[in-house]
Image (cartoon, rainbow, N blue to C red):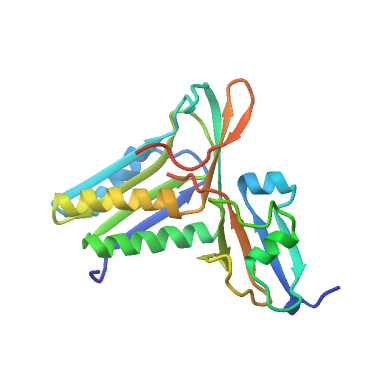
Amino acid sequence: MNSTHACLDLALCQRSFDPHALLANWELRQTNAATAVFLGRMRGVSLDGDALRAMELEHYPSMCEAQLHQLATRQSAAHAVDAVLLRHRVGTVLPGEALVLLAVAAPRRGAAQRCCQELLESIKHEAPFWKKEITAAGSCRWVEGNTPF
Amino acid sequence: MQPLATTINVRLFAALREQAGWGCRTMPLMGPSTPLQCWRELELGGEHLPVGIRVAINQRFVAADTTLQAGDELAFLPPISGG
């Protein structure tokens, strides 16, 4: 694993955020040749086909932030990238709102894309977040695991 | 009242918290114990940790047979669904 001096800008967001404004501001500080971006939004329909009214995103305070930092440090070192931007919602999220914004800057596209994908997958499996879907009809259901890749 | 040094704090999240009806509890540590023994003692569901339930001590993932220390924060985590 390579050593890392990547600049990590990681945060949880209690309220909705504008991913494009955040990304534009972060991009002002980047001079790398390649940037890979993933933007995930809350779906309006559950995997069972039910219309959704909202989602509650619960997390384990402190452990969640520590895990995000550890995962970003590990992946940025493994892929020798220069900078990582991550914003992840917690609390009540509405359909169409941004859930996660992840951007990775690197000297080459391969490193940027691979780091972005692998960091996102590791967050999905190793960072303690839990989604509770609230349907338009008012029923609630905890989401078991992750959506298909 | 038990002295602080002989207890641990147990935390539950998401579906586990709702099933148990509590999210945080202090329990005495009466000698060498593990997360699995606490799971049984708290009657959280069966003799074995269900598939998909993960354990953290002091906010780090650990195995269910890790030895607990007085003052530890033990957490049982249902399947993660972030991102």
Could you tell whether B70 is left or right of A95 in the image?
Answer: right
Residue nearest the observer in this picture, A16 or A40: A40
In the image, residue A127 above or below residue B71: above
Residue nearest the observer in this picture, A49 or A40: A49
Q: Position of residue A114 (x, y in %)?
A: 23, 51
In the image, residue B33 above or below residue A66: below
In the image, residue B38 above or below residue A136: below
Q: In which quarter of the image is residue A137?
A: top right
Could you tell whether B53 is left or right of A81 in the image?
Answer: right
Q: Position of residue B24 (x, y in %)?
A: 71, 57
Residue nearest the observer in this picture, A115 or B36: B36
Q: Which residue is drawn at 53% across and 38% down?
A: A143
Q: Which residue is drawn at 49% across and 27% down?
A: A46
Q: Position of residue A83 (x, y in %)?
A: 26, 58
Instruction: Give the total number of marks visible in the rendering.
Output: 0
Image quadrant occupied by the N terminus of chain A: bottom left
Q: Position of residue A66 (x, y in %)?
A: 47, 63
| Direction right: furthest residue | B1
Image quadrant occupied by the C terminus of chain A: top left
Residue nearest the observer in this picture, B17 or A24: B17
| Direction front: furthest residue | B47
Q: Which residue is drawn at 26% across and 68% down?
A: A5
